[in-house]
Structure formats: C-alpha cells, structure tokens
Image (cartoon, rainbow, N blue to C red):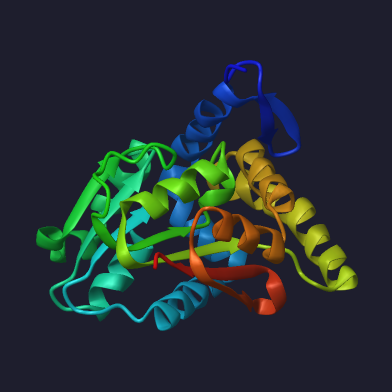
Amino acid sequence: MSDQTKTTHFGFQTVAEGEKAGMVHGVFTRVASRYDVMNDVMSVGIHRLWKDAMMDWLAPRPGQHLLDVAGGTGDVAFRFLKRAPGATATVLDMTESMLIEGRKRAEAEDMAGRLDWIVGDAMALPFADRTFDVYTISFGIRNVTRIPDALKEAYRVLKPGGRLMVLEFSQIPNEGLQWLYDRYSFNVIPVMGQIIANDRDSYQYLVESIRKFPDQETFAAMIREAGFSQVKYRNLSMGIAALHSGWKI
C-alpha cells in the first residue's frame, strides 16, 4: 500500500500517511515563535524539571556526540552540552522555523562551535550508521507518522553502546487523575493557544496527539522491538510524562 492509501491519526482525525508530516509541519511552523512561551504556560514551568530529570538519568559524559531529534529550539541540546565538557550536539527537526528560533537563543551563540542545526526527518535520518553516542527525542515522537520507523533509525545511527532516551507525554495510571488531566488539557490548553499564540487549532491537535500516544508499557515494547536492550521507563508527575531509556548493545 502507498502512503496515500495507508492511514494514520492526526490528533483524533484519520488521515493518509502521506499527509501527516505536512500537517505536523504546519502546526509547528505556526507556533514556532511562541513555542517556548507556551511550554512554560501549559506546564507551569514543569517541563524544565522534566528535562532536567532527563539529563540526570542520561548523565552526559565529556566528548559524547548527541543527536537530538525533533530538537526544535534546542532546550535538550543546551542542557546536554552544559553538563558534558567537550561534547557536541546535532539538533534535527523537520520544521526549519523551529530551528531558526533555537539559533536566536543566547545559548546557541555561546555554544555555536559545538552545535549543528539540521532540517531532517526522524524516519529517514541523513546520517551514516553508528554515528552518535546518544539519541534523544523530547515531546516529538508522538508526532512521527510511523513511530517504529523512527525507532529503527535511532538504533541505526547509534554506536554500539549508545543510549536512546525519549521524553514524552504519557498516560496517568489512575483513571480519576487521568480524567481530571484530560479536562484541563481539552478545556484549557486550546484556549491558552488562542490567547498566547493566536492558534487554537494547533494546540487542540497537540492535546489530542497526547491521548493517542501509547501507554508506557506499550511504548517500551515498541522500543524493544526496534532492537534496544535494557529498556526501562520512569513516570514523571504521576505519569503526565514519562522517560523511556534503551541501549544499543
């Protein structure tokens, strides 16, 4: 079947596989200039703590080469480089306007000699096999058209002994708390998007995409299926987000 006859989801909509990437690109092109502000508002700043927790578990080491996929405005790459003297980072994103916003940040100028910014597709990475020591993707994998393809690409470009780490919104393992979180997500976040970014529809998609993403155990199984070993996860904020880790042995 072609990408135009296979279907996938775009939030709660069913769309042709070949259309999703362009639709996601449109979302992030529209919100790029307000993306960092909206992250702070939506999470009340907690996304910063989640990214710090990611770095704590990852424990960056001097000299490592990071690939941060769907790296957007550079949040994770900046944190990685601050913790790892002599390390380098490549930030890859399918949306050029997100990378442009990242390059405007003061950290980008300070770390310019250790950073590359590349437009590219998570499902077809423009890098040779066994290139990177670490692969990260934060709040991006749920937007990929075919998640198994992205995980296989992550495995391919990592060196033996390399580490995968995924930070993503997840499912709260308590029905009552999940219900309350859903009420906040669906009733408040799109309104914030309209007020702050003048774009309700993009943030409606973002909250819908969170609910369509697999739960923690299902996603861990997908990582193992891609070839990774020692796959583990940690819930953050009761499971609103989760960190998944795997190793290429």
The total of numbered circles placed on residues is 0
Q: Position of residue 141 (x, y in %)?
A: 53, 50
Decide which of 16, 181 is in the foreground and name it.
16
Quarter of the image where one finds residue 204: top right
Quarter of the image where one finds residue 18: top right
Above-or-below relation of 122 to 49 = above
Q: Residue furthest right?
A: 176
- Is residue 163 rendered to the left or right of residue 109? right
Above-or-below relation of 120 to 90 = above
Q: Position of residue 146 (x, y in %)?
A: 56, 38
Residue at x 50%, y 63% (from the top left corner): 166
Residue at x 42%, y 42% (from the top left corner): 122
Camera sees residue 70:
no
Residue at x 40%, y 77% (from the top left corner): 58
Above-or-below relation of 51 to 68 = below
Q: Position of residue 176 (x, y in %)?
A: 90, 71
- Is residue 71 rendered to the left or right of residue 239? left
Q: Position of residue 88 (x, y in %)?
A: 18, 64
Quarter of the rendering occupied by the C terminus: bottom left
